[in-house]
Structures are given as C-alpha cells and as structure tokens.
Amino acid sequence: MMEYTSGNLVDDAARILASPIPRRQAVKALSRILTGSLFAAFGVRSADAQRSPCGNSTCAAGQICCTASNGRQFCGTGTCCDTISCEPGKSCCTGPNQIKFCSSPAQTCCGYASCSSSQKCCPGGTVPFCADSTAICCGGVSCGQNLFCDAGRCRASNA
C-alpha cells in the first residue's frame, strides 16, 4: 500500500479532477487514494506474505508496482496507466494531449472517452468522439438517419 504525504495526496486528487475521465472513474480513483492514505495514516499494512517493492513502500499480493511518467511509484491492481492503475479487464487509453484514462471492458479508446460496442469512434474535428454506430462521421459532428455529410455539415437528403 502506498504512503501519501499531504502534497502527493493533493497533487494526485487535483490531477484526477483535472483529467477528462468520466465522473464515475474519477470518484473511484479519488476514493482509492483517500482510502489508501487513511490506512497509511493509521499504519495499516497488508498481512500478505508476498509483496513487491515499490518506492519506499511495498505492494500487497495481487498488486503490481507502477511507475508514472513523473517517476513516482505506486501500487496498482491491473494495468499501469501513467498516474493511475486500470482495474483488471480495463485498458489504458491515451487521449489528446497525452492524457491517460482507463476504458471499460470491451470498449474502444476514442478521444477523451471510450466507445461502447454500439458506438464507433469519429476521428474528425479537433478531438475524436463516440457516435452511434449507424451515424455518419462528418467533421466534428455525426449525422443521423436520413442525413449526409456535405463539407463538414450534416444535410438532409433530397430523396
């Protein structure tokens, strides 16, 4: 379990809140950080015999040691994803400006989000985005049924 100083805790919380990940993921990440810092404050350690070295601390059995791009090490439970750890089954995505976030299982990384199986990633515009799989990608928007893309704008068909 990682030990937090007040500076690391505030920095990590600020990074999570500033990142464009969905609120549910941000709340989960913040709760893990706060829970870990609370346990560390009371000196609670895992009784597991197997531990892996991680910075000034050790990771419990079933955890891995991750190293963020800033060199800080922390314990994670799945895939290391820069300053966070994706839960098992989730993938690490790299969004615009190299911001990392975790996608849900069976979803595709797309811009600042991950698209479900009923969506597709539209690469147009300044940031890729998820759209309905039946829509037509048209610049920074997607065109719905009975529309077509004309110079980056959705237009009604004349038929």
Image (spheres, rainbow, N blue to C red):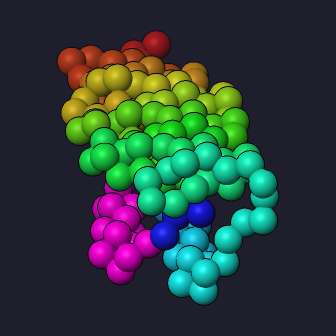
Residue 157 drawn above or below residue 54: above
Helix, strand or loop: magenta stretch:
helix
Q: Nearer the viewer, residue 63 or 30?
A: 63
Q: Which residues are magenta?
A: 4-19
Q: Is residue 91 left or right of residue 69?
A: right
Q: Is residue 156 above or below residue 79?
A: above
Determine which quarter of the picture holds residue 35: bottom right
- Name the residue at 57% across, 22% down: 134
Image location of residue 23, percent across then percent down: 50, 63
Q: Is residue 32 left or right of residue 141?
A: right
User: Residue at coordinates 44% horizontally, 53% vertically from top-left?
Assistant: 55
Q: Is residue 46 above or below residue 111?
A: below
For this rendering, which residue is in front, 111 or 119? Answer: 111
Q: Is residue 14 visible?
A: no
Residue placed furthest toward the bottom: 42
Residue 3 position, x and y percent, is: 49, 70
In front of the other: 29 or 149: 29
